Image (cartoon, rainbow, N blue to C red):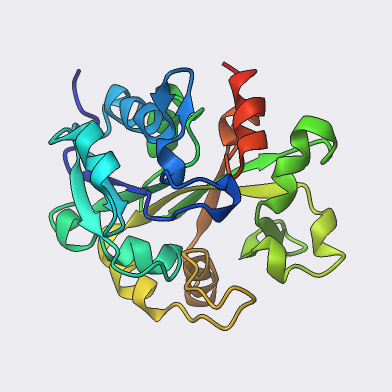
Amino acid sequence: MKHLSPKTGVVILAAGHGTRMKSEIPKVMHELHGKPMIGHMVDAVISSGVTPKPVVVVSLQSDLIRAYFGNRVEYAIQEKQLGTAHATAAAEEALKNVDRVLVLYGDLPLLSAKTIENFTKFSSDHIVMGTTTVLNFDEERKTFFSFGRVIRNEEGAVINIREKKDCSTAELTIKELNTGLYSFPASWLFVHVKKAENNNAQQEYYLTDVIFMAMKEGIPIDTVDIPEKESFGISSQEDLKIAQTFM
């Protein structure tokens, strides 16, 4: 397959253990229809033609992931789990020769190659993020309640992304959600990702903080609507069971 751009790199964040899974296995290695979650992700990225070899950010305890992929992917190590901004920064060396970086979370196994390919078409000089809008948070959609909310101003421009644990009561009613899919100019990303601060409920360095930095700098932030099913993130065994019904 012809690759869309040899200067677009893809990083998949996969270092988190996922305590809600209640398992000794890394979260992204739990299987969905006979394949690890991150296996679905990597296959979709490669099939999209964006890059032949994505970078996977792993923890020091990454034997299962390395055994599964071998040399199909490149690896970057996040020695301490200090949040998504910290994890993204760990991939800087592996992505030093690209112009743009597409950042994915490893717990989105339903994301399709077509969506990934379509998303990159919006990646000009702007920052681009994928969002999904749900009707409600009932039944099978209740897992979306844990997603970050997209905050817009009166003109409709994105001004922030608020993690669920940091939302006010009013913000929790927002149904436009952050899917964890981003595209950034590479040089801008790796400068700004190191400026993230951890003064939040989790005391972690959020990748979403760079959206607020972009707003302050006047950088346009485009949003791309991602299908609800493909936006379904898996954080628990219950989520995994629900995802089985989507495939």
166 left or right of 22? right
The image quarter in which residue 36 lies: top left
Q: Is residue 9 visible?
A: no
- Where does residue 48 sit, x and y in percent of width and height? 32, 25
Q: Is residue 108 visible?
A: yes
Q: Is 162 drawn above or below residue 181 in the view shown?
A: below
Please report the residue visible at 20 percent of the width from the left and 49 percent of the height from the top: 75
- Where does residue 195 sit, x and y in percent of width and height? 40, 80
Tell me the quarter of the image containing the N terminus: top left
Q: Is 68 drawn above or below residue 144 in the view shown?
A: above
132 left or right of 223? right
- Where does residue 171 sit, x and y in percent of width and height? 80, 63
The image quarter in which residue 126 lies: bottom left
- Specify the farthest residue to the front: 24
Q: Is 33 drawn above or below residue 196 in the view shown?
A: above
- Where does residue 94 sit, x and y in percent of width and height? 16, 55
Please report the residue visible at 55 percent of the width from the left and 55 percent of the height from the top: 19
Please report the residue visible at 67 percent of the width from the left and 56 percent of the height from the top: 150
168 left or right of 97? right
Tell me the quarter of the image containing the C terminus: top right
Q: Is 196 drawn above or below residue 141 in the view shown?
A: below
Please report the residue visible at 73 percent of the width from the left and 60 percent of the height from the top: 155
**Residue 235 vs residue 141, the one in the foreground:** 235
